Amino acid sequence: MTKAAFFTLLAMLFASASAAQESGRSGIAFVQAPEMSSGVCTGKDAQSAFACAKQQCIDGGGTDEDCVEMAYCFPALYSVQVSILHTEGIHWQEFFCGWDSKEAALDAAKVACDTEKRPFIADCSAAAIYDEEGNMKDLINQ
């Protein structure tokens, strides 16, 4: 790729992100305190979405120090929360966001749960899916 093509592509990416923000779209942020709590919020920018998600994490029992920013996507589109159990017993959540469809987000969860690529996984599943507005659908307790 030439320098001119690279900078043209870069300008197009910034223009599309700016247009998405101006259209009122939101981003989505995921915060987690492993083994304790988590938070998920949408917002007009990363800072406000992460602040909201961190407060949810703290309100759910996590500490300020333990509630860590995990992922942010703009625009939010579809996101999936994957629950993972390690063979040694610890468990955590992974978040994959910015997918064009619910099906694509669920496919990302399948890749994350591939025990051939990640042999340390004892159990793994898509736990929740989020739409662009941050509405969650619980996939475990349906």
Image (tube, rainbow, N blue to C red):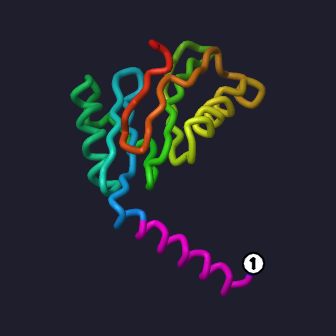
Name the residue that disc number 1 marks: 1
Which stretch is magenta? 2-19
Q: Is residue 73 left or right of residue 120?
A: left
The part of the image, by quadrant, that contains residue 123 is top right
Residue 52 found in image quarter: top left
Q: Nearer the viewer, residue 58 or 102?
A: 102
How far from the left and from the top, in percent, is residue 105?
58, 37
SS type, badge 1: loop
| Percent x, y of residue 20 | 42, 63
Left of 138 or right of it: where is 5?
A: right
Q: Is residue 49 magenta?
A: no
Asked whether, in this view, residue 124 is left or right of residue 132, the answer is right
* Of the pair 133 and 125, the residue shown nearer to us: 133
The dominant secondary structure in magenta is helix
Residue type at numbered disc 1: Met
* Residue shown at the point (44%, 21%) measured from the top left: 138
Is residue 11 a member of the stretch shown in magenta? yes
Location of residue 13 by image quarter:
bottom right
Q: Residue at x 34, y 67 (%)?
A: 22
Number of callouts: 1
Q: Quadrant of the N terminus?
A: bottom right
> Where in the figure is residue 26, as x and y percent of width and height?
36, 53
Query: Residue sitting at 29 percent across and 37 percent down?
Result: 65
